[in-house]
Amino acid sequence: MRIPATTRGRVLVGLGMAAVAVFFLTTVPFHRNWFDLHVYYGAVEHWIGGAPIYDYLRPGTHYGFTYPPFAALCMLPMTLVGWHSALAISQLLNIAAAAVVLHVCLDATIRRESRHRWFAYTAAACMLALLEPVRDTVSFGQVNLLLLALVLVDCRLLTAGHERFPSLGRLAGLGIGLAAAIKLTPAIFICYLLVTRRWRAAGVAIGTASGATLLAAWAAPTASRTFWTEAMWNTDRVGSLAYVSNQSWQGMLARLTEPFAEPSRAVWAVGVVLLLWLWARRARQAAAAGDELAGFALTGAAACLVSPVTWVHHLVWLIPALAVLADKGLRSDPGGRRRRRLLTWALVGYAVLCSSMVWLWRWNDGGAPGFLGANAYVWMALLLLLLLPLGGPGTDRDGPYAESGPSATMGTCAHATASLSRSVPVSRLSEQPPSPTRPGSKPAPSGSGG
């Protein structure tokens, strides 16, 4: 495929890609009808009216607000506007967050590989929008992209982002701390800072998260006490662990044992310990190789695996890993075996993560093939954790991981954006709402609190 050499031609191709993306997004099934945003909006209105926020349940469901109180404080401005305005603001924030994610993850690759950066970013944005976790985040009205952007800003501050503005480097950890105070999952990035001995950044993150949590305790003591002593431990608030949208290690165990028994807590705990050991080892390797984005990417993959509940829309945490795979593939020798393997896996991984294939086995009644397919994103996260290449080309860190690593979803994104823009031949915790359900069954949640 050859991209037009003229600006007009590239504009027409860019508009065509955008039209294809919009058509897909407006016709694809599984739109979530802003379910989580409805929960957020109803909960804060319930709270501002004087009722306990964690007593709120969305009408017709048994799902309510499950985020920490600091998140509720951040959402209070929604009470100042109507529903449609809140929806519009939510979408604008998602667009801004997506722009930050693309910039941090792909800017270095695009600068190196592309002569037309605006065109490369256009292609990257279109491909990002088609990923199921991104589609779900937007159609649920979720906050995942915002949290990912906060965390990745710290990645930028820890690397080249503060070279031109050294004083900004001292703020590294602020985004991670805020994200951890809003939702518990990003707290694993504080562990990353500690494991890699980024003491100052870890201190900033811990201080920020603690300060935000204490502010919420001062502003809303009753809500804080309820959350930390009751709501956080009430797993019934987030739905069935065996639901196919839960693409975590515990979700996989639940699907393996249900309906005959509950998943073994001991087996789950042993698996978590092993996964965290592997993550810590590889994260230190990434830091030693000076590969900060890879370290953050490994941490995102580990977060998806060890979290008790990882709804499909939480899998935006895999985006940095996919971007790293793309960059490693593009750095490899043109025409080489490693490059071909990485970019081939990139195409396959991207297609899988756009396909919503796990829903084919949402009832977990397909035997062994069904078990494999229902956990497709678990396998993807595990492979990324195991095989993500680290360091630059020719380094020891690249060795076996680069040769056999799956270059998932965003790999294709970066490959396409870079290759197309050079004009040369190119050799998807609230509820899991409106998904198809069996007659008489109720849709399980995907994450208005999770």
Image (cartoon, grey):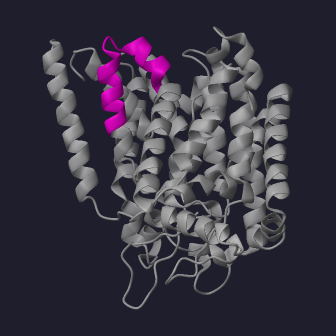
Residue situated in front as seen by the camera: 77 or 280: 77
Q: Position of residue 315 (x, y in %)?
A: 52, 51
Q: Going 35% across and 63% down the picture, which residue do you hit?
A: 31
* Residue 407 seen in this snapshot: no
Q: Is residue 63 above or below residue 101?
A: below
Q: Nearer the viewer, residue 221 or 14?
A: 221
Which secondary structure is most common in the magenta stretch?
A: helix
Determine whether 363 is above or below 439 in the image: above
Can residue 48 be seen in the rendering of this structure? Answer: yes
Q: Residue at x 63, y 76 (%)?
A: 56
Q: Quadrant of the C terminus?
A: bottom right
Q: Position of residue 413 (x, y in %)?
A: 37, 33
Q: Is residue 266 above or below residue 153?
A: below
* Residue 276 in picture, x, y percent from top left: 75, 48
Please state if 379 lies on the left or on the right of 113 as rendered.
Answer: right
Total numbered badges shown on the rendered structure: 0
Residue at x-position 43% and y-position 31%: 342
Q: Residue at x 36, y 69 (%)?
A: 360
Q: Is residue 419 magenta?
A: no
* Residue nearest the viewer, comparing 208 with 422: 208
Left or right side of 171 for 356: left
Along the line of sight, the residue nearer the viewer: 27 or 400:
27
Query: Was residue 108 drawn as part of the magenta stretch in this picture?
Result: yes
Quadrant location of the N terminus in the rendered image:
top left
Residues rendered magenta in the picture: 106-126
Quadrant location of residue 279? top right
**Percent coordinates x, y for residue 109 in the rendering:** 45, 19
Residue farthest top in this picture: 164
